[in-house]
Image: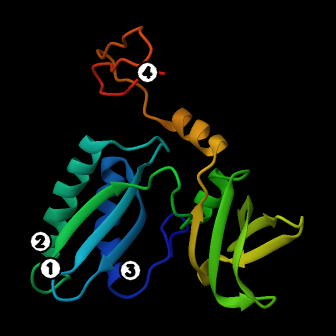
Amino acid sequence: MDADLPAHSGLEARLVALVAPTLEDMGYEIVRIAVLGRESPTVQIMADRADGSLINVDDCERISHAVGAVLDVEDPIPGAWTLEVSSAGIDRPLTRAKDWNRFAGHQAKAEVLVPIDGRRRFSGVVLGAEDGIARLRLDDGTEAALPLEEIRRARLVLTDALIEASAQMARPVETGEEEKSKVGEENPAGRKLH
Protein backbone atom coordinates (compact mmCIF):
# COMPACT_ATOMS: atom_id res chain seq x y z
CA MET A 1 0.00 0.00 0.00
CA ASP A 2 1.16 3.56 -0.75
CA ALA A 3 2.56 5.11 2.44
CA ASP A 4 1.07 8.47 1.46
CA LEU A 5 -2.47 7.06 1.46
CA PRO A 6 -4.43 6.56 4.65
CA ALA A 7 -5.13 3.00 5.80
CA HIS A 8 -8.66 1.89 4.91
CA SER A 9 -10.39 -1.44 4.49
CA GLY A 10 -13.41 -2.79 2.63
CA LEU A 11 -15.52 -0.31 0.67
CA GLU A 12 -13.50 2.65 1.92
CA ALA A 13 -10.28 1.09 0.58
CA ARG A 14 -11.98 0.57 -2.79
CA LEU A 15 -13.10 4.21 -2.83
CA VAL A 16 -9.57 5.40 -2.03
CA ALA A 17 -8.22 3.30 -4.92
CA LEU A 18 -10.84 4.77 -7.28
CA VAL A 19 -10.54 8.45 -6.41
CA ALA A 20 -6.92 8.94 -5.25
CA PRO A 21 -5.45 9.10 -8.80
CA THR A 22 -7.98 11.77 -9.83
CA LEU A 23 -7.28 13.86 -6.73
CA GLU A 24 -3.52 13.50 -7.16
CA ASP A 25 -3.81 14.73 -10.77
CA MET A 26 -5.70 17.77 -9.43
CA GLY A 27 -3.03 18.53 -6.81
CA TYR A 28 -4.88 17.14 -3.76
CA GLU A 29 -4.40 14.26 -1.32
CA ILE A 30 -6.89 12.12 0.57
CA VAL A 31 -6.67 12.48 4.33
CA ARG A 32 -9.61 10.21 5.09
CA ILE A 33 -12.61 8.58 3.44
CA ALA A 34 -15.52 7.36 5.55
CA VAL A 35 -18.82 5.79 4.51
CA LEU A 36 -21.60 6.47 7.01
CA GLY A 37 -25.06 4.91 6.99
CA ARG A 38 -26.48 1.94 5.12
CA GLU A 39 -29.68 2.60 3.18
CA SER A 40 -28.62 5.98 1.81
CA PRO A 41 -24.92 6.22 2.73
CA THR A 42 -22.88 9.40 2.94
CA VAL A 43 -19.35 9.27 1.54
CA GLN A 44 -17.20 11.73 3.48
CA ILE A 45 -13.90 12.76 1.98
CA MET A 46 -11.33 14.87 3.81
CA ALA A 47 -8.63 16.27 1.57
CA ASP A 48 -5.51 18.44 1.63
CA ARG A 49 -3.58 20.20 -1.08
CA ALA A 50 -0.55 18.16 -2.07
CA ASP A 51 1.67 21.13 -1.09
CA GLY A 52 0.29 21.02 2.47
CA SER A 53 -1.68 24.26 2.31
CA LEU A 54 -5.29 24.31 3.47
CA ILE A 55 -8.12 23.82 0.99
CA ASN A 56 -11.04 26.22 0.69
CA VAL A 57 -14.67 25.99 -0.43
CA ASP A 58 -13.74 26.30 -4.12
CA ASP A 59 -11.31 23.39 -3.74
CA CYS A 60 -14.04 21.31 -2.07
CA GLU A 61 -16.39 22.07 -4.95
CA ARG A 62 -13.78 21.03 -7.56
CA ILE A 63 -13.06 17.82 -5.64
CA SER A 64 -16.77 17.07 -5.26
CA HIS A 65 -17.43 17.41 -9.00
CA ALA A 66 -14.42 15.28 -9.97
CA VAL A 67 -15.02 12.56 -7.36
CA GLY A 68 -18.78 12.52 -8.07
CA ALA A 69 -18.04 11.87 -11.75
CA VAL A 70 -15.62 9.03 -10.93
CA LEU A 71 -18.07 7.39 -8.52
CA ASP A 72 -20.97 7.77 -10.97
CA VAL A 73 -18.97 5.95 -13.65
CA GLU A 74 -17.46 3.25 -11.41
CA ASP A 75 -20.66 2.83 -9.34
CA PRO A 76 -19.05 1.20 -6.25
CA ILE A 77 -22.04 1.99 -4.01
CA PRO A 78 -25.41 0.49 -4.91
CA GLY A 79 -28.40 2.84 -4.77
CA ALA A 80 -28.49 6.47 -3.73
CA TRP A 81 -25.63 8.04 -1.79
CA THR A 82 -24.48 11.52 -0.77
CA LEU A 83 -20.98 12.94 -1.16
CA GLU A 84 -19.47 15.34 1.39
CA VAL A 85 -16.06 16.90 0.79
CA SER A 86 -14.22 18.92 3.42
CA SER A 87 -10.88 20.14 4.61
CA ALA A 88 -9.29 18.02 7.31
CA GLY A 89 -9.57 21.06 9.60
CA ILE A 90 -7.20 22.33 12.23
CA ASP A 91 -7.74 19.51 14.75
CA ARG A 92 -7.42 17.03 11.93
CA PRO A 93 -7.19 13.26 12.00
CA LEU A 94 -3.71 11.74 11.74
CA THR A 95 -4.19 8.97 9.18
CA ARG A 96 -0.83 8.70 7.42
CA ALA A 97 2.81 8.53 8.52
CA LYS A 98 3.38 11.86 6.79
CA ASP A 99 0.67 13.44 9.01
CA TRP A 100 2.49 12.24 12.13
CA ASN A 101 5.76 13.67 10.80
CA ARG A 102 4.24 16.94 9.58
CA PHE A 103 2.61 17.65 12.95
CA ALA A 104 5.49 16.56 15.18
CA GLY A 105 5.59 18.76 18.26
CA HIS A 106 1.80 19.18 18.50
CA GLN A 107 -0.60 17.58 20.98
CA ALA A 108 -2.64 14.57 19.80
CA LYS A 109 -4.93 11.84 21.09
CA ALA A 110 -4.93 8.33 19.69
CA GLU A 111 -6.86 5.13 20.22
CA VAL A 112 -5.57 1.73 19.14
CA LEU A 113 -7.49 -1.43 18.21
CA VAL A 114 -5.44 -3.75 20.40
CA PRO A 115 -4.26 -2.60 23.85
CA ILE A 116 -0.59 -1.69 24.23
CA ASP A 117 0.74 -2.22 27.75
CA GLY A 118 -2.85 -2.58 28.93
CA ARG A 119 -4.21 0.63 27.43
CA ARG A 120 -6.00 1.69 24.26
CA ARG A 121 -6.08 5.48 24.57
CA PHE A 122 -3.02 7.70 24.46
CA SER A 123 -2.51 11.46 24.68
CA GLY A 124 0.71 13.39 24.26
CA VAL A 125 3.07 15.22 21.94
CA VAL A 126 3.48 13.84 18.41
CA LEU A 127 7.08 12.72 17.83
CA GLY A 128 6.61 11.50 14.25
CA ALA A 129 6.36 8.14 12.51
CA GLU A 130 8.84 5.76 10.98
CA ASP A 131 8.74 2.17 9.75
CA GLY A 132 4.99 1.87 10.35
CA ILE A 133 5.18 3.11 13.96
CA ALA A 134 3.75 6.44 15.19
CA ARG A 135 5.29 7.85 18.35
CA LEU A 136 3.85 10.01 21.12
CA ARG A 137 5.60 11.47 24.17
CA LEU A 138 3.07 10.96 26.94
CA ASP A 139 2.38 13.39 29.79
CA ASP A 140 4.50 11.29 32.18
CA GLY A 141 7.51 11.65 29.86
CA THR A 142 7.42 8.10 28.52
CA GLU A 143 7.14 7.34 24.84
CA ALA A 144 4.37 5.27 23.23
CA ALA A 145 5.01 3.40 19.97
CA LEU A 146 1.74 2.88 18.10
CA PRO A 147 1.65 0.64 15.02
CA LEU A 148 -0.04 2.73 12.31
CA GLU A 149 -2.16 -0.21 11.16
CA GLU A 150 -3.46 -0.69 14.72
CA ILE A 151 -4.57 2.92 15.20
CA ARG A 152 -8.36 3.08 15.30
CA ARG A 153 -8.34 6.87 15.31
CA ALA A 154 -5.88 9.66 16.03
CA ARG A 155 -6.52 13.38 16.02
CA LEU A 156 -4.66 16.58 16.78
CA VAL A 157 -5.75 18.48 19.88
CA LEU A 158 -6.72 22.10 19.29
CA THR A 159 -4.11 24.33 20.95
CA ASP A 160 -2.90 27.90 20.42
CA ALA A 161 0.31 26.54 18.90
CA LEU A 162 -1.66 24.42 16.42
CA ILE A 163 -3.87 27.37 15.45
CA GLU A 164 -0.77 29.49 14.83
CA ALA A 165 0.88 26.73 12.76
CA SER A 166 -2.32 26.24 10.75
CA ALA A 167 -2.47 29.94 9.95
CA GLN A 168 0.98 29.56 8.39
CA MET A 169 -0.36 26.73 6.19
CA ALA A 170 -3.23 28.84 4.86
CA ARG A 171 -3.04 29.20 1.13
CA PRO A 172 -1.39 32.49 0.16
CA VAL A 173 -3.53 35.11 -1.54
CA GLU A 174 -3.47 34.52 -5.29
CA THR A 175 -1.98 37.05 -7.69
CA GLY A 176 -4.46 39.80 -8.47
CA GLU A 177 -6.21 39.61 -5.10
CA GLU A 178 -5.68 42.66 -2.97
CA GLU A 179 -5.31 42.82 0.77
CA LYS A 180 -6.95 45.62 2.73
CA SER A 181 -4.67 47.22 5.25
CA LYS A 182 -7.23 47.66 8.03
CA VAL A 183 -7.22 44.95 10.68
CA GLY A 184 -10.50 43.04 10.99
CA GLU A 185 -11.75 43.85 7.49
CA GLU A 186 -12.19 41.16 4.89
CA ASN A 187 -10.01 41.19 1.82
CA PRO A 188 -11.38 40.22 -1.62
CA ALA A 189 -10.20 36.64 -1.05
CA GLY A 190 -12.74 36.42 1.78
CA ARG A 191 -10.17 36.00 4.57
CA LYS A 192 -10.28 38.22 7.64
CA LEU A 193 -7.11 40.07 8.40
CA HIS A 194 -5.94 40.11 12.03
Q: Which residue is mark 3?
A: 13
Disc sitting over residue 33 in the figure: none
Q: Are marks 3 and 1 in contact (CB under 8 Å)?
A: no
- At a point 37% along the width and 70% down the height, the residue shown is 33
Q: Residues within 10 Å of mark 1 (few under 14, many from 20)?
A: few
Mark 3 or mark 4: name the one nearer the start of the chain: 3
Tag in front: 4 or 1: 4
Residue 18 x %, y %: 28, 72
Q: Which residue is mark 1?
A: 75
Dot 1 amino acid type: Asp
Disc sitting over residue 193 in the figure: 4
Q: Residues within 10 Å of mark 4 (few under 14, many from 20)?
A: few
Question: Image quadrant of residue 183?
Answer: top left
Between the residue at mark 1 and the residue at mark 2, the CA separation in whole angstroms equals: 5 Å
Residue 68 x %, y %: 16, 64
Q: Which residue is mark 2?
A: 72
Residue at the extreme front of the image, as rendered = 184
Between the residue at mark 3 and the residue at mark 1, the CA separation in whole angstroms equals: 14 Å
Mark 2 or mark 4: name the one nearer the start of the chain: 2
Residue 140 x %, y %: 88, 67
Tag in front: 2 or 4: 4
Secondary structure beneath dot 2 equals: helix
Q: Is residue 131 visible?
A: no
Q: Is residue 85 above or below residue 149?
A: above
Q: Are marks 2 and 4 in contact (CB under 8 Å)?
A: no
- At a point 48% along the width and 21% down the height, the residue shown is 194
144 horizontally vs 152: left or right: right
Between the residue at mark 3 and the residue at mark 2, the CA separation in whole angstroms equals: 17 Å
Dot 3 amino acid type: Ala
Q: Are marks 1 and 2 in contact (CB under 8 Å)?
A: yes
Between the residue at mark 4 and the residue at mark 1, the CA separation in whole angstroms equals: 43 Å
